[in-house]
Image (cartoon, coloured by chain):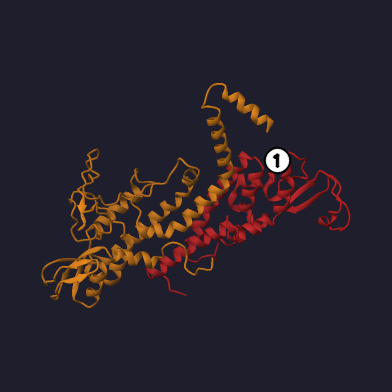
Chain colours: A red, B orange
Amino acid sequence: MSYYDIDSILTDAQKLPCTFELEVPGLGILEGNPGEDIKAGTRIDLPLWLGEMLSIGARLGTSRLVTLDMPEALSERVMNALKADPRTIDLRALAPHFYNLSERILELFEEEEMVEVLGDTFKKRAAEIADHAHNSRGAVGDGVDFLRGLDETERQLFRAAHDRAKDMRIWSGEAKRK
Amino acid sequence: MAFPLPRGVTASEIAFLAEMETVTIVPRQRLEGLELLGGPVEPLVPPRRASLPLWLALLLKRQRRANIMPPAWLHPEPLSLILEVESGHQDYKNAFSPPPPLPGQPSVLDRGQEPTARPQYTPDGNRYYAAPPFLPQNTAQPVNSSRDPPSLPFHWVEVGNMLLDAASDDLVDPDQIRRLLKDLREVRMAKLRSGVEVLDAAATGGGGVALTGVGSMELGEERGFVTGVVDGLRKIGSSKEQARREQMAEQRANGGYDGTQDDDEEEDYMEF
């Protein structure tokens, strides 16, 4: 993750449900009514970078400002669906940077099982991606629905595999250079 | 990101590297010896075979000044044998057929023998062991004994393709060779891709994927994908890895592993 990595920046902007533990004067702007106070117990979706900062107080010994909850994209329901069949899930609809997000979330939460499920999902989907990438018809054909549901990490994977296969076909004279 | 070329080596670059391989030709015209950067080329006298770099051989072939003798492995029989081993043999279900033995390496037939590599010396007196592409793996008769089973050299995709392109009339049954090469490529690519199943073991340490015998073109083609998968799995597993490291550091700080440790750890966990 580099400082200028656009995917990393976009991951930071993904929303995370947070619950305020304390009453904060004048922060109502987050809720959409500027000038007001935020009551304790209010639930607001905050970007990952902000939620992370506000919740980190707990580690420093001071009382924490907010508690983080699991985002919808990594909820129990999604995990069960991924366990059942990773290939039919539209990860992009859940979160455009699904794996980057889950990586950050796993740093914050201790979820042994989620690591297993996500690793398994990634592997199974990667095998599927490889098959589609080496299909000479590329991204058109039967796999359109699956390929539309790829998250950003998987898209890069698909692009790497597909470009290489195409490069190889062009070199060996099977395909024409476009 | 803005760099227009894909990362890694492109197919045409790999093919360029493969043009350094030595092949055997039968010249049709006389040619005096050439002093090339890569080493001198012997004088060509028509009926006598000569060994040249592939690029020069292809040049002479296109000018109809020489015929290329196909490499020992580029015949229908060895190729179909290798294909049989790759696709049918029990031991090679997930592995690739072994690469040609290095000089001094005992053949596959007599296992357990000590390797007896003989070093060679540069003009400056530095010791080195020859490795591809400086081994004549694509000449008409390989130096290693003929009782070795046929094997695919490192640059088999490139050399095979280029010879089929430029010198198909010198090959024995080029259509069948083309078909066999295509089949071999498909079988091996499928194996390489099915390797993602075990890649997570490689990503979290301890595991690994054997790539012995994989050709350079195959490596170049799968590099982007395989490294991407390993990287993705590493990221997903990084929190677990972090926890494991911390645990190990803790153990080391506590002075190694002993019986009471389990209880301590449990308490720590509860606190956390």
Viewer-side residue, B83 vs B208:
B208
Q: Residues within 10 Å of mark 1 (few under 14, many from 20)?
A: few
Viewer-side residue, B94 vs A156:
A156
Q: List the single residue furthest toward the bottom.
A: B63
Residue B32 image position (x, y, % from top left): 14, 74
Q: Residue at x 37, y 60 (%)?
A: B217
Q: Relative to residue B127, is residue A14 drawn left or right? A: right
Instruction: Please identify the quarter of the rendering in which residue A83 is found.
Output: top right
Q: Dot 1 lies on which element?
A: helix
Q: Residue at x 61, y 61 (%)?
A: A6
Q: Is residue B178 visible?
A: no
Q: Residue at x 21, y 46 (%)?
A: B117
Q: Relative to residue B63, is residue B233 drawn left or right? A: right
Q: List the single residue furthest toward the front.
A: B124
Q: List the single residue furthest toward the top.
A: B259
Q: How many marks?
A: 1
Instruction: Please identify the quarter of the rendering in which residue B26 is found.
Output: bottom left
Which amino acid does the dot numbered 1 rest on? Arg
**In the rendered image, which quarter contains the C terminus of chain B?**
top right
Q: Is residue B272 visible?
A: yes
Residue B116 image position (x, y, % from top left): 20, 44
Q: List the single residue furthest toward the right.
A: A36
**In the rendered image, which quarter contains the N terminus of chain B?**
bottom right
Q: Which residue is mark 1?
A: A59
Residue B203 image position (x, y, % from top left): 49, 46
- Chain letter, disc 1 residue: A
Residue A97 image position (x, y, % from top left): 63, 56
Viewer-side residue, B3 vs B178:
B3
